[in-house]
Amino acid sequence: MDPQSLNFFRSAIETPSPSGYEQPVQRLVRSYIEPHADSIRTDVHGNVIATCGDTSGPRLMLAGHCDQIGMLVTNIDEEGYIYAQTIGGWDPQQLIGQAMTVWTSGGPVPAVISRKPIHLLNENERKQVVQLEQLWLDVGAKSKAAAQEQIRIGDCITLDLRYRALLNDIVTGPGMDNKTGMWTVVEALRRAVEMTKASGSPMRCHLHSVSTVQEEIGLRGAKTAAGSVNPSVAIAVDVTHASDCPTIDKHQQGDIKLGAGPVIFRGPNMNPAVVERLISLALQHAIPFQLAATGRATPNDANVLQLHGGGVATGLVAIPNRYMHSAVEAISLSDIDHVAQLLAHFACSLTSQCDFIPA
């Protein structure tokens, strides 16, 4: 992987982007891709849309959401403790004892989130699953007034945004869902531009790489971005559950491994011709890949992309992720590298002669 591209990915993981508060990471996206795109814009919803290629060719939309789950401040009590709502889907068990950050207009404020110590829990409390209402954030303030000097109602909160390298090209941290997907669609545009320059052949589609917003609260950014892009073909990129760790049922989730390549999904939400084209390109360019299937509408951007307007030929490429929606989400750098390469080849091979009508 190109060192600059890897640095962009790490910076994205270390930059906050709870749903509705994606502006810091979107500034990073714009800065990275602007030198390579023909045009770049941010729409009123906050989606960043970078384009290149033949404006008269088929419109290809690559969508990867940049938002992550988080929290937001709802109250500060008289002692200066902070209470919060979740943004997106949380398991409260994942929050107990975590280092957090409150992102304020004056800068980040370190915090911790916790509950009553186990020593003080009664027998019934020890048997119960903790509820969000039983947790609070501590920033070290001595009073409500002291906390309010820095923190306002509605400020967003994230886990400590720490990027760590494990063995075997595995990296871990919060927000891999779905800054990995965002990175791949942005990086695919950069690589597609490089491929066309190297080959001397112009790109024959009009590529729109979109860093979408607010996926975690209802696929909202992809829906509005599709309204302005109006794609004829679209590929969403998101994470999927890796099943190469204990307790995950391979019979239901599929045999999905970190480091084994992009996951190409099949099923009713995916256009069969787009699926076969992705598989063919992976084979042609020696890109490892895995197959997965889902028999329902997907819970990601592919869902709304397929249903835009009169219908869009849609694909879903996924990145294996262990421990989703936690502080230690784990992915393989080789997987995101291969996803970006596959998407770039898809863009460079797309022409107005391509037919995605199911036969």
Image (cartoon, helix red, strand yellow):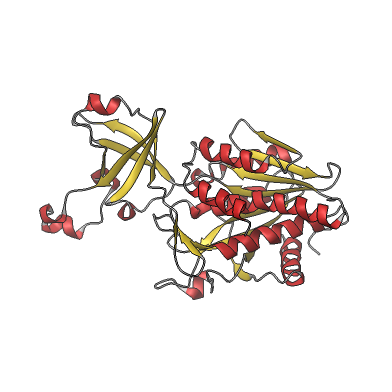
Please tell me which residue is depicted at 19% across the width and 60% down the height of the picture. Answer: 127
Rendered-image quadrant of the C terminus? bottom right
Counting from the top left corner in percent of width and height, residue 309 is at: 72, 43
Relative to 65, is 345 on the left or the right? right
Q: Is residue 335 above or below residue 223?
A: below
Please tell me which residue is depicted at 50% across the width and 62% down the height of the picture. Answer: 331
Counting from the top left corner in percent of width and height, residue 197 is at: 82, 52
Rendered-image quadrant of the N terminus? bottom right
Counting from the top left corner in percent of width and height, residue 293 is at: 60, 67
In depth, the one of 264 and 173 nearer the eye is 173
Q: Is residue 127 above or below residue 216?
A: below
Q: Is residue 171 above or below residue 203?
A: below
Counting from the top left corner in percent of width and height, residue 9 is at: 55, 51
Please tell me which residue is depicted at 27% across the width and 36% down the height of the picture. Answer: 82
Q: Quadrant of residue 247?
A: bottom left
Q: Residue furthest front?
A: 3
Total numbered circles = 0
Q: Is residue 317 visible?
A: yes
Q: Is residue 294 visible?
A: no
Relative to 349, is 177 on the left or the right? left
